[in-house]
Image (cartoon, rainbow, N blue to C red):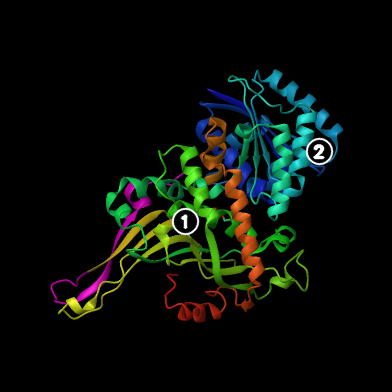
């Protein structure tokens, strides 16, 4: 049985309330017979464990009062100033007490759901208070989870990385990206390399363009302070979208182990370059709480990039993301080249084959083919669809629940390596250096109107 103490720094923040505490609840509900854990929350606020749970309650799905109360009984909250070593020492003492009370090994999963500004200081204080130590013991594990974005630019990421490496070993560091836990993202590698039909055409010989589209209906909600400092480029492009891109574009790894996959992904990220793009900001953004009244932060991004590797020569990768758009979905579209129409005598409309990978909200694949329309002699594009929910009839576990249980098992598949982080930040620097134009767009729309001009300019169609 896996056993550990789960410590969350930043327990009163948005991520903990919306995702982490609900994930602990689901994990407790589904796996309490296989996983023995207690939860300790820490943040600067002065609140009780009841108040902390009340904040998260509305985000819990399949709510069951008994389970909720049981989980609360093995949960604790402590006020901690992240800069105060003394607070960490007091916390360390409490953790020893809890571990004794529940007869738990000192296995510790420490989740930093706090701004990256605190990553170095918290890690140092964790080490100096002996909550974590560099371990070389196979029986005991202590792992620290760093939420994305890891830093706010290349330099900050470098100095955070140098700092944390002084206190813990690489195998204890989890620079996580919750998109890597989504079932479909996770299976891109298996899909690509287990279906010979696709791998054979996975190159510039057959592919016209690739689109990665990450649309959200939600606004920045209560995250004004964070979001206004980061914007869409650093919030989702630097991490989720580039991770997806690297899985799609990577060369075949030597084997499908984590180390080889990471090396192949890094090679892609090292070779991405930006050609053009536009930025957008939704109308009403400047009135959001904790946003500067003259803010130039982008809530929308559309980019044209290239991956400078022989396989992808001249294949544009289009990335598009935004808040307050007309729908929530994350999709990848592989648009194949068109066949020559001269060959065909039949009337109709021939179009590119498109392989679409739907990551959320529902998971699935679809493949667009040209086929005869019924018993007519007309050819039309038609879609074959593989919908996970329809096929398997159940919901896949929520990402953060998967994430926490994978870290408990010591699976580094959901962790991003330092080279990947470094190259991703370098790419963001390239984009910033272009000083892309910014346009306003209406909430609930497709984004700035200029995005259509953008596709006209490069002669492709956005697949929404
Ligand atoms: C987070 C971003 O990492 O991912 C959010 O900070 C975004 O701005 C979220 O809304 C999207 O994740 P999901 O799992 O809801 O698609």
Q: Is residue 376 magenta?
A: yes
Residue positioned 84% across, 41% down in the render: 83
Do labels 1 and 2 touch, CB within 8 Å? no
Residue 48 visible in the current orientation: no
Percent of width and height locating residue 41: 72, 37
Judge whether 291 appears above or below 178 on screen.
Answer: below
Residue positioned 53% across, 49% down in the render: 266
Judge whether 103 appears above or below 321 on screen.
Answer: above
Magenta region, residue range:
371-398
The residue pinned by badge 2 equals: 79
Please give left or right for residue 16 compared with residue 273 in the image: right
Please give left or right for residue 186 compared with residue 291 in the image: left
Is the distance from the Cβ of mark 1 to the nearest ligand 1 atom less than 8 Å?
A: yes
Q: Secondary structure beneath disc 2?
A: strand
The residue pinned by badge 1 equals: 360
Residue 206 visible in the current orientation: yes
């Amino acid at each position: 049985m896996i056993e550990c103490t789960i410590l969350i720094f930043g327990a009163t923040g948005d991520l903990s309330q919306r995702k982490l505490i609900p994930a602990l609840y689901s994990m407790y509900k589904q796996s309490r017979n296989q996983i023995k854990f207690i939860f300790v929350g820490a943040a600067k606020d002065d609140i009780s464990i009841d108040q902390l749970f009340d904040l998260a309650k509305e985000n819990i799905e399949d709510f069951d009062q008994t389970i909720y109360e049981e989980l609360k009984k093995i949960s604790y909250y402590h006020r901690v100033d992240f800069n105060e070593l003394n607070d960490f020492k007091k916390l360390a003492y409490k953790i020893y007490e809890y571990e004794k009370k529940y007869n738990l090994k000192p296995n510790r999963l420490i989740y930093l759901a706090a701004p990256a500004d605190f990553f170095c200081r918290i890690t140092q204080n964790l080490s100096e208070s002996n909550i974590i130590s560099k371990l070389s013991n196979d029986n005991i594990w202590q792992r620290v989870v760093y939420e994305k974005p890891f830093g706010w630019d290349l330099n900050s990421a470098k100095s955070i990385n140098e700092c944390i490496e002084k206190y813990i070993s690489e195998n204890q560091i989890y620079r996580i990206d919750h998109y890597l836990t989504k079932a479909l993202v996770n299976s891109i590698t298996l899909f690509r390399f287990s279906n010979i039909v696709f791998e054979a055409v996975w190159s510039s010989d057959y592919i016209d363009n690739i689109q990665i589209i990450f649309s959200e209906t939600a606004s920045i909600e209560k995250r004004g302070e964070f979001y206004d400092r980061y914007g869409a480029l650093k919030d989702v492009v630097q991490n989720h979208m580039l991770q997806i891109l690297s899985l799609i574009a990577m060369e075949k790894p030597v084997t499908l182990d984590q180390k080889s996959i990471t090396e192949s992904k890094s090679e892609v990220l090292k070779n991405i370059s930006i050609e053009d793009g536009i930025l957008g900001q939704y109308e009403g953004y400047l009135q959001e709480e904790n946003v500067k009244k003259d803010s130039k932060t982008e809530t929308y991004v559309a980019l044209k990039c290239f991956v400078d590797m022989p396989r992808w020569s001249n294949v544009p990768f289009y990335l598009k993301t935004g808040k307050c758009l007309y729908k929530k979905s994350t999709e990848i579209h592989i648009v194949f080249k068109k066949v020559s129409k001269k060959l065909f005598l039949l009337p109709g409309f021939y179009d590119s084959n498109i392989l679409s990978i739907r990551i959320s909200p529902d998971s699935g694949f679809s493949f667009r083919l040209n086929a005869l329309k019924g018993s007519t002699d007309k050819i039309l594009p038609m879609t074959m669809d593989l919908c996970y929910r329809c096929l398997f009839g159940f919901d896949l576990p929520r990402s953060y629940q998967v994430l926490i249980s994978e870290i408990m098992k010591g699976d580094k598949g959901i962790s991003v390596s330092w080279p990947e982080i470094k190259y991703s930040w370098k790419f963001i620097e390239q984009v910033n250096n272009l000083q892309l134009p910014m346009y306003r767009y209406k909430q609930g729309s497709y984004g700035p109107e200029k995005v259509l001009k953008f596709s006209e300019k490069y002669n492709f169609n956005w697949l929404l």
